[in-house]
């Protein structure tokens, strides 16, 4: 894909129509305490209330609903230990498409059970000795099934753009938008939505400090690959941007910021205490950077995307009571 065939705002609008009535239109929350703390007006787009608990449902459903009859019949294949797997499994179930999900043997039992619960065929692999891309490709060549990647895909990232589309329809004059960042699907979609609805809004992607591959890539002007980062933000442990997401982000992002695990725990606590909601570590990246990255937000209108709420509740309780595990 070349720069002149990159997706646009119109593709996000088309995705809005495809997911209408299927994905939840999630609420935009506000908090006087949060506003006072930052001296700004904050608008939290709460994708922790999305179906399966994260925005990933939007991109998966947008992609699968465009399958041809032949693709539908041959099925979909995804590899992921996290939210993308569940998003593909649920979308496939709703559309009557057989799904095969390649997951690590040591994935949390709750995630394995949830994925199987959506009727997907789960293929387990060993993270330390096997290559999941190779397994997915082999299944695809045997079955003719379509592999849906987690972020570097036009259908997926334009579906993710519907989050910011809804936010900006509700609050059209945002000055800033903060977006959790892994492989860049959500950030790319946000950039496209903002280009159509709020071209003056500044859009920041926020990565875990330990996994700043996108920030490094942006500074260097080419995709930098890093080892698997050690962070509690398990939805943003990506090692490298995709070629499509890197292009869209390079063209449209204001900057890429980072947040430490300590700051994520602090934000998770803030969400529990003030907004009374469960946010997973990756979903807390945006607030953590809005609070700590040194951007002057005084008197501004600020969108904060909460990307998901899928966190083991025992771990979540420990973040609240004990802070970051040592
Ligand atoms: C996948 C995910 C992200 C990162 O999204 P990308 O499109 O890979 O940048 C952020 N938060 C949550 C909760 C996720 O599941």
Image (spheres, rainbow, N blue to C red):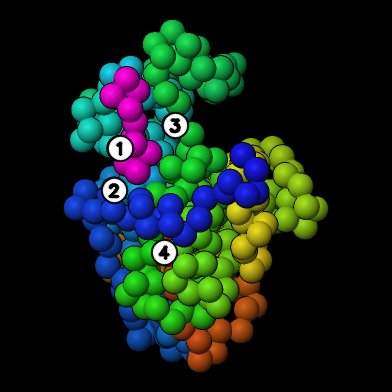
Question: Residue 37 at what x, y percent from top left?
Answer: 47, 85
Respond yes or no on whether mark 2 lies under 8 Å from ligand 1. Answer: no
Q: Quadrant of residue 226?
A: top right
Image position, residue 109 (x, y; %): 33, 30
User: Dot 3, how many residues are within 10 Å of its Cα: few (below 14), some (14-19), or many (20+)?
Assistant: many
**Which labelled disc corresponds to residue 164?**
4
Sequence-wise, the earlier of marks 3 and 4 is 3
Neighbourhood count class around disc 2 (C-alpha, 10 Å): few under 14, some 14–19, many 20 upward: some
**Which mark's residue is nearer the viewer, 2 or 3?**
2
Q: Report helix, strand or loop for mark 3.
A: loop
| SS category of the residue bearing label 2 | helix
Magenta region, residue range = 60-71
The disc label shown at residue 114, or none:
none
- First along the sequence among labels 4 and 2: 2
Whether residue 103 can be seen here: no
**Marks 2 and 1, the one that precedes in the sequence:** 2
Check residue 18 in the rendering and tell me which mark sits there, or answer none: 2
User: Is the Cβ of the residue at disc 2 closer than 8 Å to that at disc 1?
Assistant: yes
Q: Quadrant of the N terminus?
A: top right
Work out which residue is located at the far top of the displayed protein and give it. 142
Of residues 61 and 264, which is closer to you in this image? 61
Q: Which residue is mark 1?
A: 65
């Amino acid at each position: 894909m070349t720069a002149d065939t990159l997706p646009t705002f119109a593709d996000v609008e088309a995705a809005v129509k495809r997911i209408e009535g299927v994905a939840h239109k999630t609420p935009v929350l506000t908090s006087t305490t949060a506003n006072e703390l930052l001296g700004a007006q904050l608008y939290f787009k709460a994708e922790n209330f999305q179906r399966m608990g994260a925005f990933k449902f939007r991109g998966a459903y947008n992609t699968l609903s465009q399958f041809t009859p032949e693709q539908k019949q041959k099925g979909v294949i995804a590899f992921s230990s996290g939210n993308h797997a569940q998003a593909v499994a649920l979308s496939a179930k709703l559309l009557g498409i057989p799904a095969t999900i390649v997951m690590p043997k040591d994935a949390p039992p709750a995630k394995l059970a949830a994925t199987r619960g959506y009727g997907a065929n789960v293929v387990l692999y060993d993270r330390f000795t096997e290559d999941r891309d190779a397994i997915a490709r082999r299944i695809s060549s045997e079955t003719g099934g379509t592999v849906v990647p987690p972020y570097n895909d036009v259908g997926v990232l334009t579906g993710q753009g519907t989050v910011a589309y809804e936010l900006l329809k509700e609050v059209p004059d945002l000055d800033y938008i903060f977006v959790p960042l892994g492989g860049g699907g959500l950030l790319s979609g946000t950039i496209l939505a903002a280009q159509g609805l709020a071209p003056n809004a500044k859009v920041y992607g926020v990565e875990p400090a330990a996994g700043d591959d996108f920030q490094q890539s942006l500074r260097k002007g080419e995709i930098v690959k890093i080892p698997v980062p050690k962070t509690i933000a398990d939805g943003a442990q990506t090692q490298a941007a995709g070629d499509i997401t890197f292009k869209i982000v390079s063209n449209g992002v204001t900057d890429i910021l980072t947040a430490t695990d300590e700051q994520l725990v602090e934000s998770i606590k803030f969400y529990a205490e003030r907004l009374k909601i469960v946010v997973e570590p990756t979903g807390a990246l945006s607030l953590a950077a809005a609070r700590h990255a040194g951007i002057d937000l005084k008197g501004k209108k600020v969108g904060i995307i909460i990307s998901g709420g899928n966190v083991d509740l025992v771990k979540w309780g420990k973040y609240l009571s004990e802070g970051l595990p040592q």
